[in-house]
Image (cartoon, rainbow, N blue to C red):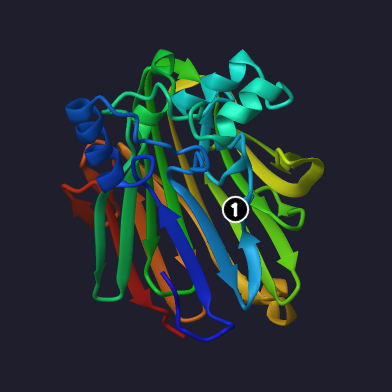
Amino acid sequence: MRSSRDTEATHLSFKSSPPGGHKQWKLSRELDKKNNWKTRSLTHYHVDFNHFILIHNDASLAIDEGYNRTSKAEVHNLITVDGTGCVGEKIWGEGDLSNSELFDLNCKGIHNVWRDVPKDAIAKIEAFSNDNGYTYAVGESSKMYYPEMELTRNARHIINSECGYFIFLDELESELEHTYTWRMHSEKYASQVNQNQFEIINGTGALNVFTVFPEARITNVDETLVEEVMTPQRPDDIRRISLKTLLIENAEKSKKSYFLNVLQPKDTLQGKLSNDISVQSIKGDGCFGVEITSKNHIETFIFSNENKIAYQEIESESKWISVVKDKVW
């Protein structure tokens, strides 16, 4: 999703797929089975299902960690469950890359994070639409997590009504109670403006993060360090990056949890509070959402896991609904 092709444009990229993409994941298995081969080598493929990056006014606001041999979900902009991510990350429970034999196998693509991931353990785009001023995508990735987490749903909805912000809704459901952690990494630390708002300023661009749900939540700003050897030929050549991480968690472990956040990119020189959108939470009978007031519009976004929305004059048998009205001056 991008506002234009200009340098100062807003650009958001979102990814949800099987490791290596649908085609490689399917055809490599077919070739291996038919010929008794081992063709699938995904050593450098990141654990970045339902991950996104965000750029505005030539400034990186939500970033990828870049190069990493031991890639994990926790260094990407996604949800971790009790601190865990992809089922394949278990490989590093057997050791780390300080072990020279393991390091060599990893570099050859033989010993990699996707080694024991079953065929049906994939993420995918469930729905996508770009029509009438709305862009909408939802990625589902519950099968990518450890089976013992017993996740039945991990869906990330991203909605853009072209009013200057993005609505992020994450559905988390499991047979067990968990702590779910919403993670977003940036080059600069987020500052807390108030109980429900954080601000990130990075050069010419800035980002407001409005936290709406869960109502009972724990928020934190922390540093995530990534240190990796670039190549086994130069073991002292280590790449280091410091990610500034915004974390949001449900306050108590639960089987279900919903994260609703609104991300508003803005220019640094115009980043005063007077230019911020206004965000107000909504709760109805079996539904919840947010009312967003921007410069020229008021958007009402409501979600219902039961496909039954009833709030004031709005009634719909839908998963979610968005109503955008022109602001009356």
Q: Is residue 214 visible?
A: no
Vertically, is 118 above or below 208?
above
Name the residue beneath numbered marker 1. Answer: 64
Q: Choose between 286 and 107: the one closer to the eye.
A: 107
Q: Indicate whether 166 appears above or below 145.
A: below
Q: In which quarter of the image is residue 150?
A: top left
Q: Position of residue 256 (x, y in %)?
A: 41, 26
Q: Residue at x 32, y 23 (%)?
A: 118
Residue nearest the observer in this picture, 190 or 38: 38
- Residue 56's spot in the image, x, y percent? 59, 73
Vertical comparison of 82 with 266: above or below: above
SS under mark 1: loop
Q: Relative to residue 62, is residue 24 drawn left or right?
A: left
Q: Which residue lies furthest to the right in this view?
A: 236
Seen at 64% across and 66% down, the residue is 60
Which is nearer the eye, 267 or 302? 267
User: Looking at the image, can residue 15 be seen?
Assistant: yes
User: The residue under label 1 is which amino acid type?
Assistant: Asp
Picture layout, residue 160 above or below residue 127: below
Residue at screen point 48% across, 65% down? 12
